Image: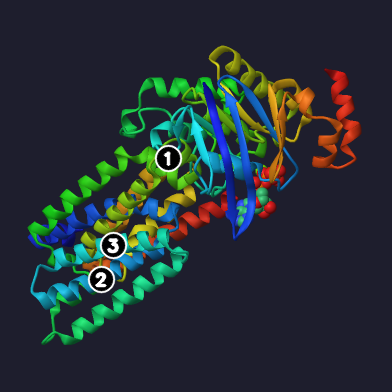
Amino acid sequence: MNMITEFLTYPFIQRAFLASLMVGVLCPFVGNFVVLRRMSFFSDAISHSAFAGIAVGALLGIDLSLSSLIVAILVSILIAFLSEKTSLSHDTVIGIAFSGAIASGMLVIGKLKGYRVDIFSYLFGDILAITYTDLLFLFIISLLSIVILLFFSKPLLQITFNRDLARVEGINVRLFEYLLFFIIAVVVTVSLKIIGIILVTSLLIVPAAAAKNLASSMKHLFSLSCVFGLVSGIIGLIASVYLNTASGPTIVLVSIGIFFLTMLKRQRLT
Amino acid sequence: MNALSVENLCVKADNRHLIENITFSVEEGRIIAIIGPNGAGKTTLIKAILGLIPYSPGSVLLFGHSMKHANSRSGVGYVPQKLEFDRTFPLTVSELLAFTVPPIYSFPFIRRKGEKKHISELLEIVGVQELEDRSIGSLSGGELQRVMIAKAIVNDPKILFLDEPASGVDIEGQERFYDLVKRLNKEKGLTVILISHDLNVVYRFADSVLCMNRRLICTGRPAEALTDEVIKTVYGEMMGAYIHSCHEHD
Ligand SMILES: Nc1ncnc2c1ncn2[C@@H]1O[C@H](COP(=O)(O)OP(=O)(O)OP(=O)(O)O)[C@@H](O)[C@H]1O
Ligand SMILES: [Mg+2]
């Protein structure tokens, strides 16, 4: 315990703590929609598009967070647009966008001169390298996303439950779906720096899936998923400091541990 | 005024007509029953009217407005034939009904006290107030159907589309439901479009009947439109005898 209190006096650890608290709530909150709508593949495609954005940003010499955000949003809109306007299945469209993003990202990175550490910190995430600006940005995005999702929770959940009923009730289904895709794209991208491209989808879906194992109401689902996310964030970060492991994977493994515990409980219930 | 007018409505899938040239209108405050054999296109017709599937050519006016304007949709209640949803969806009955209770755009933690009361009242009307906190996935078919009926009338609709609403509902529930529909129709002038295979229900509740099998076969008052001839062409020889017994009840 002493070691933890000692560690907590370091500013970079404090920032890491705040960051893991915020993504611990934000990712599962948004992740509930991803799980209920079975969109984990979409969220994966978005994080990998962000990778292409990072590569392009590095090539053009612009801010990597900004370039990744722009590309991620563009790709999410493209996916939504193509699945709506063509007869291709949603799955196929995402698969193509996914491979296109990775391939172009790798191509661009190959053209860059020298080894870029900052790019690889996005791949695996680096919670200990978070700056105050990153924290502020993360805080604003978290607050805005959660407020918007809560304010529009009725129509968003209604279209998730059944699109036809939502449409008959006068809800603009397409508009809300675009809004949701947009928010997922933003949340995935801002979480990249902390958790990494490869694992960001896990933090979105694992705590939400664990909560879904136990919940029988929306209220339960949303509160439990955030609790699980928070617990994974805190325990994962502490464990990673103790064990000297990478924080992103440690946090995700803790959440998977929680998931298996909820599975046991679920098995006993049924 | 006509609550609903449908003109030359055609719905195609893979170059095959699912429904063809359907034209009819419903006056405000009337109950119209749509009948026809399985696969006749009844569900397709209602979905096209509600704008859930595309049609061409054809035109649909609800209270004089095209359904393409989203705001003309408010005031519409719909009970689908079969609700497609994920049984593991963690959602309680009252949460489902709350989606429809205005204000639609609001923070869930600022729940108006009225909302809860409104929901209990609705559930009491359809006779399932004890289901309020049950999860949707755990309901029986008939219980779910009653909840869907409650959901369709949350906002005092002006027109109600019911696609075999009482299928799977027990006799008590059916009586309760059709009494409710009749009461709303009498007291509030609710217009009802009802798909049913139960000709007894059609005779008792409908002001008029529309008989279809891909195309329109006939429309009119039930007792007049449903001649032996029509019943035989729609349902086959077997039904002739059944229909006589219905007439005698009248
Ligand atoms: N999306 C679709 N693509 C192709 N064919 C379809 C589609 N939806 C329905 N059909 C076909 O349209 C026809 C009419 O179906 P519909 O569900 O409207 O019949 P119905 O009159 O409601 O029958 P039931 O009494 O069984 O409910 C059926 O032959 C069905 O196979
Ligand atoms: Mg049908």
Q: Amino acid at mark 1?
A: Lys
Q: Pinpoint residue A179: horizontal percent, then vertical percent.
A: 30, 49
The residue drawn where x is 66% and y is 18% is B179
Q: CA distance from mark 2 to mark 1?
A: 60 Å
Foreground pick, B40 / A253: B40
| Quarter of the image where the C terminus of chain B is located | top right
Discs 1, 3 touching: Cβ within 8 Å: no
Q: Amino acid at mark 2?
A: Leu
Q: Is mark 1 within 8 Å of ligand 1?
A: no
Q: Residue lying farthest top?
A: B187
Residue annotated with mark 3: A236
Residue annotated with mark 2: A243
Local crowd size for mark 3, using a 10 Å CA cut-off: few (<14), some (14–19), many (≥20): many
Question: SS class of the residue under badge 1?
Answer: loop
Residue annotated with mark 1: B68
Label located before the other in sequence (2 or 3)? 3
Local crowd size for mark 2, using a 10 Å CA cut-off: few (<14), some (14–19), many (≥20): few
Q: Amino acid at mark 3?
A: Gly
**B212 left or right of B131 in image:** right
Foreground pick, B38 / A152: B38
Ligand 2 picture quarter: top right
Q: Pinpoint residue B112: horizontal percent, then vertical percent.
A: 35, 23
